[in-house]
Amino acid sequence: MKPEQAAYVNLVAIARADRRVSQDELSLLEEYREVLGISKGFAEEIEGTADLHVVIPRELNGRPADRLQIVKMMLRVGYADGEISIGEKRLLKKVARSLGVGPIALPALFWEVEKEFGIRRSLRLFQIVAGSMIVVAGLAIWFALDQFGTDTNREIEAARLEFERAQADDARRRVRQAREDRKKDEARLAKRLEELEAKNAKERKDQQTALTAEIDALKTALGRVRDLNATFQEIEKRSDPSILLILVTYDLVLGADRFSQASMGTGFFATSDGHIVTNKHVVEPWKFDADQVALLDSGASVDEASLFMAAWTAGSEVKGPKGGLNLDGAFTTTEKTLKVERTTPDTYAVQHRPLRSGKFYKGQFHTANSGDLAVLKAAPPAAVHALPLEPDLRAAKKLDTVLVQGFPTGIHILETTKAATSPSLGEIRKIESSIMVTAPIVPGNSGGPLIDSRGNVAGVAAANFGDSTLGSCIPTEHVLPLLPTAPELLARIEKFEAAGEFRAALDDLRLAGQRCDDDAVRRAIDATRARIFKTRDERIAAARKIEELQAQRGALKKIVASFGSRWAAEAVELIEK
């Protein structure tokens, strides 16, 4: 159901909450139907539904302004018949809680709408009183005329005095005066009534204008949400093959006792030949976990021979048919297809941290700051898709929408046998030594990429602060020193170029440029890029000359396969045409 339709269903539901629908409520529902763009057929179907329930438009959960607009619209419908019933209040509170409108914002909305409708009722009451005054004045004059005529006739009949004519003339004069006074009162009241009607009409027009503006703002906001969702859905689809689920197991040994431990997290490919970025606490958790630090302080040690690591790319089979681990498609330390390439230097500080028992332990803990990074090296059989890095913090701003990719809770979140990511959207709250975001970051997300709206990795998910919707990410600038140098990358790029894997070569050239601090190496990078682009342009030009349409499309698709859609946008455009 579209958000506009869901909003209209809620408006009809609040109108029915007191088991009657007034004419004012029907009129306001019709106005909202038109401004929301709801068809009459849909409106009649909803109004004919006997058991109608409110609907929460999930697309608006991340937009406070849109949620307030829906609650305000429902309040107007509730107040249309003059008051809010208990049933209507109960329903409004339920919808407000579902939309995230808190106990402070909701009473403020009640007060605002009640004040708005209080002004309308005052105008209507004044019109009624003015009309009543006209009627009473007319009756009083009629009664006076009637009574006066009766008294005059009695005097004529009783006295039969010679002043009868003079008294009759005087009576007529007084009647004329009363009529003139009545006309003046009627004119004064009519003018006042006209002024009130004009004022009322202006207020109705102003309210209609304000309502139309609110609806337009709501539609605009909905359009932005849909466009943003479409953008990040494409980014998620493109980045998913580069995300890895990481598992680390090992034993802590204390005398004759062995304590089996496990750690899970997320990583992502940063180079085309298999360098994986993740958190240090994912691959060396015994330096960060309070219970394990306490055990090591008591004399335990890590059994290096028991240390095992495995990494599965998203979409690969993680579980076997009987529920055990499937290592056939994984990178592992036992098969020598996975190893720890580099970690940040160890830095320790005395801290108090909670144990799983609830008590606190004071010990030397590895500091969880920008030094919580590690790079693994996988041995893929072919070039992988590396995610582009954005080390410049100036490219990110507060309230920018970002995507967190990963496996929250690790293997436990998998409902099938395959490694399926669980992406989430949020906004940047703060950018300093770390990037604070509202996107959920829970254990298992650690080491996953924080991706901006251009598809670049702005940070690495690292921790949360007691609330899964307040996450901390390490800026990408701290990742670069752990990756291969520009000369090392150039040596690999030459192999990719020779093998015709131009997409991988161009992806790593971008990283080499970020790692370069030498003019001679930069010239070599620029020359290699120019040479590859020349090859691409020559192939596109040759494809353009092919007259047969299907053959031309086939040639263009091969170019896109070799260079990737990111680096062969012209070929993609020609295919679409």
Image (cartoon, helix red, strand yellow):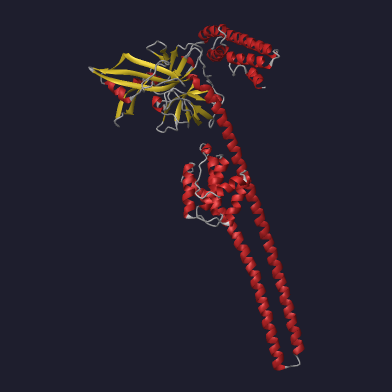
**Closer to us: 38 or 408:** 38
**Closer to us: 230 or 199:** 230
Visible in this render: residue 112? Answer: no
| 314, above or below 536, in the image | below
For the N terminus, which image quadrant?
Answer: top right
Residue lying furthest left? 256
Q: Position of residue 436 (x, y in %)?
A: 47, 29
Visible in this render: residue 97? Answer: yes
Query: Is 358 on the left or on the right of 545, as rendered?
Result: left
**Closer to us: 90 or 456:** 90
**Closer to us: 39 or 121:** 39
Quarter location, residue 187: bottom right
Q: Position of residue 496 (x, y in %)?
A: 54, 9
Residue at 74%, 87% (x, y): give it.
167
Residue at 71%, 92% (x, y): give it.
157
Q: Position of residue 251 (x, y in %)?
A: 30, 18
